[in-house]
Amino acid sequence: MASTVAQPRAEAANRLGMSRQHMIYFGILIAVLVVSPFFFYPLFVMKTLCFALLACSLNLLLGYGGLLSFGHAAYFGAASYITAWSARDLGLTPELAILCGIGASVLLAVVFGSLAIRRQGIYFAMITLAFAQLVYFASLRAPFTGGEDGIQGVPRGELFSLIPLASERTMYWFVAIVFMLALFLMYRIVHSPFGQVMKSIRENEPRAISLGYHVNRYKLRLFILSAAFAGLAGGIKSLVFSVATLNDVYWEMSGEAVLMTLLGGAGTFFGPILGAAVIVTLQNQLAPYGAWITIIQGTLFVLCVMLLRGGLVELFGRIAGLVRRSN
Amino acid sequence: MFEALGFSAPAFFGQLLLGIINGAFYALLSLGLSIIFGLLNIVNFTHGALYMIGAMVAWMLATYFGIGYWPALLIAPIFVCLFGIFLERVFIRHLYQLDHLYGLLLTFGLAMIIEGAFRNVYGVSGLSYSMPEMFQGSVNLGFMFLPLYRGWVVAVSIVVCLATWFVIERTSLGSNLRAATENPKLTEAFGINVPRLLTLTYGFGVGLAGFAGVLAAPIYSVSPTMGANLLIVVFAVVVIGGMGSILGSIVTGFALGIIEGLTKFFYPEAANIAVFLIMAIMLLIKPAGLFGRTS
């Protein structure tokens, strides 16, 4: 009986490589993206999507590789600067500019990643943070980054030299489509044989080594992939807001990315998106109150670590469990 | 000799002195971090914020109560120490059984709350803290002028570092502490109150940070954000030194301060990133750090 029920489900899962539950989540997400420009400012939704992508990229590393990077601002910010620079000063089309930005992030990740994976756990976190600070100082001093002002007035340009992205609506659809494609790609990575090996390394590294996997090679690949997605987020961000600034590379940005991931639920696929939405909303609502936002974000960190290590996803799971039991 | 090479000796020694002073702060902070990490297995992200509290308390004592530098040098570290004990009792102790990353995340959150609270009241601009009168002025050493206060900072931080080393390596309290670091269960079986030792260690480690904060108050501008950037450099120092040995973190702290100072003299553009570059090189050569154990 059990096998006959399992059969069609497995077939459905195989077509897209997705469980039914995750398909429903993807469906809901697409519906939300289609509807939300009619309810919210497109700029706000685009900001949320950029940060959601950043949080998801961090989650790829933390949730599926067990590696906590406290320096993802480096890859986000480097891509933001390079995209802005190549769109404004080289006059590249947006898709090429973003690719250049991702390329810069990937290069950085190759160098920093291969050094950082030599240490584990908290050392890994401290090393990534220190390297991010190095990128911060480099961005402050580099000749093309504009110092304290950053790169301003970045043109959104014309996608493939055909579609002008200047209007918020067009830009929104571009960002939404790129976001969904990136998300789907990450889903495929997580559920690929590569992703399974990463999970096994996270769970038991000595065992993975004894099974013959080159653990460091896998970790480095995951690190580079994660940095590439962070770069995509940074590149889009600089086009959406027409600016690349030092804030993008500062450690607070790294901290925010970690908070979004943690708040949503590290290691859950959709949690970080939720976390990003909550944090960006909070930032928007609390913008006039100065440093209160820092205090509240810090409090969320503390609450998550002390009470809710699975994040909001776990909270919803618990509530759903309670509701089911009472029925 | 220096003129022949085209440098000016006062500028050279001036940067060297600045480097040694930075090194003193790196040493005091990384010492506290190492002790806390060794026993509690927690990377204390609040360390920078508590260093800031040390400086802010000194400033507040002077501004609101007219209490001078010397009492502040005692009161502020004790306050920071008690605050640290409070944090350990209420928050940190619940995480000892979990992955070390949670300790890092928790203390990061606490640091955000502390800094945010101070920023709300005092903004981000620097507050000035006047130097004690007996340290105003400088002494001519022949090759350079040594501002008295800076000489004092270097001297006192070396004394405090060595005293800490002595307590940990040469006293019975220190041997209890090292035993608890090595094997907490067995130490507890010998009748030593390990949880209390953990609390005291945390208090002492952050007390050192508070002490460094008071020392820093007259030379760096006192501001709510003064700890955060310093802490990241100290993390790099800790990675370079390895958290294995007490003497190691003291030596590494001073050495990196000096290297940073020399970089500022020879190639100022790279001064801010010198420590991070050295960290990268160290990861290539000896990933465990200078004094670190490989495991």
Image (cartoon, coloured by chain):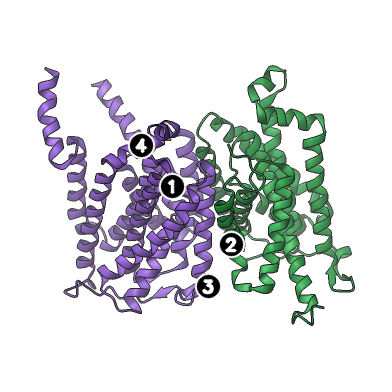
Chain colours: A purple, B green
Name the outermost residue toward the front: A212
Mark identifier at residue A199: 4
For marks 3 and 4 on the same chain, the one whose residue lies earlier in the sequence: 3
Q: Disc 4 to disc 1, how far (Cα)?
A: 22 Å
Q: Disc 3 to disc 4, how far (Cα)?
A: 39 Å
Labels 3, 4: front one: 4
What amino acid type is highlighted by mark number 3? Arg
Give the residue pinned by disc 1: A259
Q: Looking at the picture, do discs 3 and 4 lie on one chain?
A: yes
Q: Disc 2 to disc 4, how far (Cα)?
A: 44 Å
Callout 2: residue from which chain? Answer: B
Please tell me whether residue B93 is drawn above or below residue B56 in the rendered image.
above
Secondary element at image label 4: helix
Foreground residue, A238 or A43? Answer: A238
Q: Residue at x 67, y 38 (%)?
A: B202
Give the residue pinned by disc 3: A141
Give the position of the C terminus of chain A as an image quadrant: top left
Q: Disc 2 to disc 1, how far (Cα)?
A: 24 Å
Q: Is residue A211 left or right of residue A249?
A: left
What amino acid type is highlighted by mark number 1? Leu
Q: Residues within 10 Å of mark 3 (few under 14, many from 20)?
A: some
Q: Disc 3 to disc 1, how far (Cα)?
A: 29 Å
Please tell me whether residue A90 is drawn above or below residue B89 in the rendered image.
below
